[in-house]
Amino acid sequence: MKDERKEISRRDVLIGAGKVAAGAAIVSVGVASFVSNGKASGTTVYPYKKLDIDEVARIAHETYFTKFCAETTLTGLFKPLTVSVGGPYTSFPLNSVFWAHGGLMGWGTACGTLIGAGMAVGLITAGDSTKVTTPGGRAPVAVGEAIINDVIAFYANENLPQYKPAAGQAKYEVKNQSVSDTPICHISVGKWMEKEDVKFFGIERKERCARLSADIAMYTAKLLNEWADGTYKPRNEPLANALDNQITSQGNCGDCHGDNIPTAKGA
Amino acid sequence: MKDERKEISRRDVLIGAGKVAAGAAIVSVGVASFVSNGKASGTTVYPYKKLDIDEVARIAHETYFTKFCAETTLTGLFKPLTVSVGGPYTSFPLNSVFWAHGGLMGWGTACGTLIGAGMAVGLITAGDSTKVTTPGGRAPVAVGEAIINDVIAFYANENLPQYKPAAGQAKYEVKNQSVSDTPICHISVGKWMEKEDVKFFGIERKERCARLSADIAMYTAKLLNEWADGTYKPRNEPLANALDNQITSQGNCGDCHGDNIPTAKGA
C-alpha cells in the first residue's frame, strides 16, 4: 500500500542527517497544537494532556467489573482527561464502545481492550497527520496508526497480565501470565484459561481481564505521553505480516492452520 | 452474564400480553428523545435522524478507495448526519477509526467495517439504556448492543458483497460472493480471494471490500432506522456462542480447530 502513503517521515526529520532543524520545528508545532495546557486547543477536537499512568491503570482495573474490557480501557484513558482537559471528554459517552467486549459482543475477535485503546488514540491523534518512518522502513504511517500498532503488538507479544492491583483491590490472585501471540480475544483468553485451569464465566478470568485492561490502558498512556513529548518512535513495523503474507494476517499462522499453512496468491 | 443484566425487556413490553400499553409508552418516549427533527436533542450527544440507505451505501463505496473499510463505513453513516443533524457530526474526526482497517492495522482480526459501524451505533444509541429481549430469550441486552450483534451476524452469515455500484462507479466487476461464517477479516477476505482467484493487494479485492463496506453501512442504517421508528427487534441471540461454548467464540470452530474441537472447562 506504499503508493497510497505520503512519504513524509517524522523519524527521518527527527534523526536524519541534515534534516534535524527543520524536523524539530515541524514536530514542535505539530505536538504543541494537540496538547492542552488546561484550555481547549483550536486545532483538535480532543486535546491531550499527559496522563498519570498509575491512575489510568487503577481506573481501568476497577471499572472492568461493571463495564468490561473495551469501555474500561477507554474509561481509564478518558476519565482523567475530563478533569485535566474537560471539554469534549466530559460529554463523551464512554459506553459507546461497550459493545466491543469479548471480541465484539462475545464473538471472540479482536480483544475489546484494543478497540477501547484504539478509539482513544484515534480521537486524540486524529488531527496529527505527521507520518512516521517505522523500524523496517517499509511504509510510513500516521503517528496515531503507529501508536495503535505498537499497542496491538504489546498485547500479542508480552506475558500478560502484568498489573498488580493495590492491596484489597484484587478479586482473585492471578497465578499465571501467558503470551497470546495474537490480538484475538478467543485465543488470548483461551491460552490463559488453560494455563490457569479456570473457566471463562468466573471471577478468576474476570480478574485476569481486568488486569490486562489496566496493562493495555497503561501502555497506551505511556505511548501517548511520549507522543505529547515529541519523543515517540514506533517499536514495530505496521502491516509487516500483511505485506509478507500478502493477506491481512498475524504471525501465528500455525495456531489455526497447523502445519498446513497456505501460500496466498502473490506471496 | 445474566446476573449482570437488568431484566427490562423492550420486546416483552412491545409484544407481551397485558404489557402492550405501558410498553408502547416507554418505547415512544425513549426513542423520541434520541431522534432529532433537525435540532439537537438534550438527551444524547449524537441525535439521530433516519438515513437514506442508498445514499449511505453510495458514500461508503466511493470513500473506500482512499479511506479503507472502517473509516468509510463510519463516513457512510455520519456524513449524511452532518447535513440533516449537524452538531456533533460536523466536528467528529472520521479518521479517528482509520486504524481499524484490515482487521486492526492489517492484523486481520475483526473486519474494520464492523468497528466503523460499531462506533456509529455506539455513539448514536449510547443514551438509550432500553433492554431488549432477544430471540432465544437468554440475556436481555441494551438495544445498541443487539443492533451491533445483528450487524456482525449479517456480516458472518450472508453472501457478500451484495451492493452493486451505479454505472461507471465500479473499478472491477466482482464475480463471486462468499459467506465468511465469521467476522474475522483474514478468513472472510481469504475465502473470497480463493473463490475469485485474485490477490489481496489489487483493485479486484479493493472493489470487493468497497462493496462490502457499503453492505455493512446499509444494513446498519436499516437497523438504526428501525430503532428510530421503534420497530427494531433483534434477529440474533447475543452471546449465544460464548454461552454455549463457555468462551468468547463464533460458530465456525472447525475453520481453525478442524475435527479436533476442544471442550472448554464448564461447557
Image: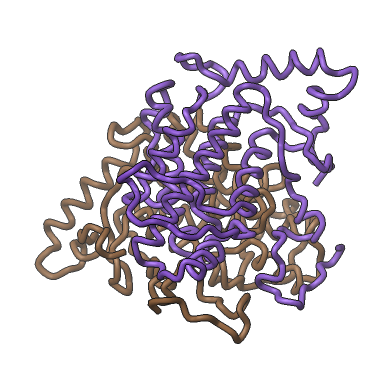
Chain colours: A brown, B purple
Please state the horizontal and vertical placement of residue A17, each as a whole percent of the image.
Answer: 13, 70
Q: Is residue A228 left or right of residue B186?
A: left
Q: Nearer the viewer, residue A149 or B35?
A: B35
Q: Residue at x 81, y 13 (%)?
A: B21
Q: Is residue B205 above or below residue B125?
A: below
* Quarter of the image where the C terminus of chain B is located: bottom right
Q: Residue at x 31, y 59 (%)?
A: A141
Tell me if residue A237 can be seen.
yes
Q: Is residue A143 above or below residue A84?
A: below
Q: State the image quarter where residue B173 is shown.
A: bottom left
Please state the horizontal and vertical placement of residue A10, each as a whole percent of the image.
Answer: 24, 59
Residue at the limit of the structure toward the right, as seen here: B18
Q: Is residue A185 above or below residue B72?
A: below
Residue at the limit of the structure toward the bottom, as seen here: A259
Q: State the image quarter where residue B122 is shown.
A: top right
Tell me if residue A165 can be seen.
no
Q: Nearer the viewer, residue A78 or B185?
A: B185
Q: Residue at x 73, y 37 (%)?
A: B141
Q: State the image quarter where residue B224 is shown.
A: top right
Q: Is residue A125 left or right of residue A11?
A: right
Please state the horizontal and vertical placement of residue B88, each as a whole percent of the image.
Answer: 42, 26
Q: Is residue B168 left or right of residue B194?
A: left
Q: Nearer the viewer, residue B222 or B31?
A: B222
Q: Residue at x 42, y 21 (%)?
A: B84
Please state the horizontal and vertical placement of residue A63, each as a whole percent of the image.
Answer: 66, 44
